[in-house]
Image (tube, rainbow, N blue to C red):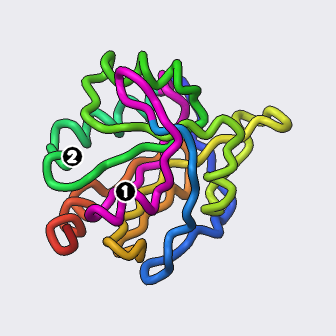
């Protein structure tokens, strides 16, 4: 039996395929340390799959990263996550879940807001997080694939993402 409600989310105002991805600088965390890195620095070196996910420890974040790991996308291109979790939480989450990617820390959900995909968390006034979303960026920062959740919980169409990676990475 499901012990949570499925919630329809309001329409997002996310960038679309063909748009330039909004650039940002935030702490980018691996299992050892973090440093402020601009998204544009990453895609200048090759295509990037930008994955917005709920806070570390939430079951959708675990499911999303397990699928990414199992499909081996990080072996084909740079895969980075974005959530409201702190760098300290990311440093724990990455090894616990066997994530072979770096995660941006966006505690105020400013990046999610920039991408038009922030939403109020569980009806708590002033507490926001990104809805699950995936953007595939080319080396110019142009969005080549986009998926944004329309309900919570919701998960990317993994086969579609994989096909987009095959076409653009």
- Measured from the top left, where is residue 22 in percent x and y? 56, 67
Precedes in sequence: disc 2 or disc 1: 1
- Measured from the top left, where is residue 20 in percent x and y? 50, 77
Label of residue 42 in the image: 1
- Measured from the top left, where is residue 68 in percent x and y? 25, 42
Quadrant in which the C terminus is drawn: bottom left
Q: Is residue 70 visible?
A: yes
Q: Is residue 153 visible?
A: no
Judge from the rendering whether residue 69 lies leftward or rightward of residue 42; answer left or right: left
Judge from the rendering whether residue 154 lies leftward or rightward of residue 94; answer left or right: right
Task: Specify the segment rendered in magenta.
Answer: 29-58
Would you name the residue on which mark 2 appears?
74
The image quarter containing residue 100 is top left
72 falls in the magenta region: no
Q: Nearer the viewer, residue 36 or 74?
A: 36
Identified at 55% across, 63% down, the residue is: 23
Classify mark 1: helix, strand or loop.
helix
Identified at 42% across, 50% down, the residue is: 51
Which residue is outermost to the bottom? 18
Q: How many marks?
A: 2
């Amino acid at each position: 039996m499901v012990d949570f409600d499925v919630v329809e989310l309001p329409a997002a105002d996310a960038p679309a395929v063909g748009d330039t991805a909004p650039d940002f600088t935030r702490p980018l965390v691996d299992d050892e340390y973090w440093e402020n890195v601009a998204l544009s620095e990453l895609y200048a070196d090759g295509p990037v799959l930008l994955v917005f996910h709920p806070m570390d420890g939430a079951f959708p974040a675990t499911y999303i990263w397990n699928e990414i790991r199992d499909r081996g996308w990080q072996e084909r291109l740079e895969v980075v996550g974005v959530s409201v979790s702190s760098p300290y939480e990311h440093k724990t989450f990455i090894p616990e879940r066997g994530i072979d990617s770096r995660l941006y820390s966006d505690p105020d959900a400013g990046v999610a807001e920039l991408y038009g995909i922030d939403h109020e968390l569980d009806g708590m006034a002033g507490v926001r997080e990104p809805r699950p979303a995936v953007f595939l960026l080319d080396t110019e920062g142009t969005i080549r694939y986009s998926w944004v959740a329309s309900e919570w919980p919701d998960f990317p169409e993994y086969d579609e993402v994989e096909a987009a990676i095959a076409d653009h990475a």
